[in-house]
Image (tube, helix red, strand yellow):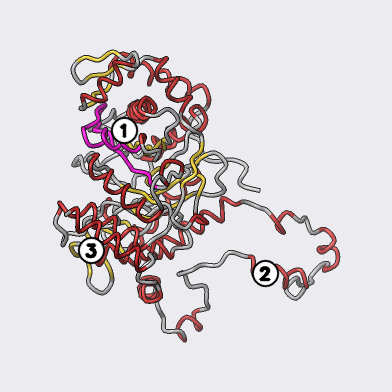
Amino acid sequence: MALASRIKVVGDAELSRIHEATVEILEKTGIEFKSEEALALFKANGAEVSGHRVKIPRALLEKSIESAPSSITLWGRDEAKKITIGQGQPRTHVEPSNGCVFTHDMDRGRRASTMADLINFFKLAHQSPVCTIGGAIPVEPNDVPPEERALRVFFETLKHTDKPLKRNVQPAHEIEEMFKMYEVAMGTGYLADHPSIYASVNPLSPLAFDTEPIETIMTYARHNQPVTILSCALAGISAPMSLLGAAVMQNAEILGGLVLSQMTQPGAGLIYAPASAVPNMMNAQYVTGSPETHLINIVNLQLAEELYHLPTRTMGGLNDAKVPDAQSGYETMQNLMQCMLGGAHIINECLGVLDSIMTNSFEKFIMDEEMISRVLRFMQGIDGIHTDLSTELIDTIGPQGSFLTHPSTMKNCRTAWRPTVSDWNSQEMWEKKGSEDVLTRANRIVKERLAACPESTLDPDLEKELSAFVESRL
């Protein structure tokens, strides 16, 4: 029995008002699309096109919303790890963090990231009990030439996880190469009826889409692979300062991308991803720990789930701390609670991330797993043995009795949630075990997990074939 309610910021009447304002923006103001192919497609479907500006009529918008699926099955190479995203999914899905430039750990501090760091984050995510999606680019491998990164990173992705995958924006030719690699592993034609990889696509706020994001949306749709349209506008800078005004603009951007995907391939998977923020207006700097940020994004989650019936995703574990300290903990837990209880189907930027997505920490990855686990348990609510009102048991034990040794306690005590990195021992027992603080324990767990992780999830012959494929393309 899940929680009886989730966080809502606005009521039904306000949702309708926001939707109507969005329709007005799309019809009157429009969105810029920097692609002749996309512009021709919009024009053929009845939109008004002037230069790069596209004004999307209500009828085309409504047709596109109707054709987008309410749930998506995303397959892993291990088909037992497939997941449902959207309507009917049993729990919040978690993906690795993405796009960090620096790596941080206790042993070496903050440093430019390498391919070795990236591989270790892949390994942690593959073994993680809370992470249901693999891939992304948890840290940028600065020791790999930019022109080689796409294929080399995807090869390491396939090598180190068999979970469903998340990828980033790429030009169409790189996406085609990546899909060919995946079908080397899974068989020609596999992707046509097995959505397995989704890409996160950002509008160019306010109200524009650049060429590569457009190529990504259209190429993925043609291959039956989902995309998530992630608007990341800054209130007062690239969006209105008004929280609801920012929600309207964000909604218009995401729905503009949805229309493009559905014109390209009706029924293509689309994940609605609000991720706007209220920045530090003292210096116009992007920050992620503001409690106001998700007042915008929960409104958009409500629109997606209550009006449009779309799968959703948002950046759920962000913080602005520079190291894994108290600030990183309370800002992360604030954002996790808001996003997960706000109903996001997928959360990202929630496993190790620090410093407004600049840095990824190995120790914080382990700490974040526990924080996510805490919220997941809370969201399960009261079920199973916990729905028993226990009147007969209470009567049997009576006043001043003890439930500790009763058979029902013995039978069910191991079902209680337990921490994975926090310490619940007494002061004396904690000291006896070495007086480790949470960061030290997390550092030890990282090393233990990496030591136990297999070096590859691929069959050796398949790994050689994929490696040869990459080398032939570089």
Nearest the eye: 170 or 426: 170
The disc placed on residue 115 is 3
The amino acid on which the numbered mark 1 sits, given as a three-letter code, is Met
Circle 1 sits on which residue? 218
Number of on-image labels: 3
Mark 3 burial class by Cα count in 10 Å: few <14, some 14-19, many 20+ = some
- Residue 325 image point, x, y percent: 33, 63
For the residue labelled by badge 2, is the local secondary structure a helix, a strand or a loop? Answer: helix
- Residue 462 image point, x, y percent: 35, 63
Which mark is in front, 1 or 2? 1
The stretch of residues the image draws in magenta is 197-220
Circle 2 sits on which residue? 413
Residue name at image x 41 percent, y 81 percent = 435
Quadrant location, the C terminus: bottom left
The amino acid on which the numbered mark 3 sits, given as a three-letter code, is Met
Mark 1 or 2 closer to N-term?
A: 1
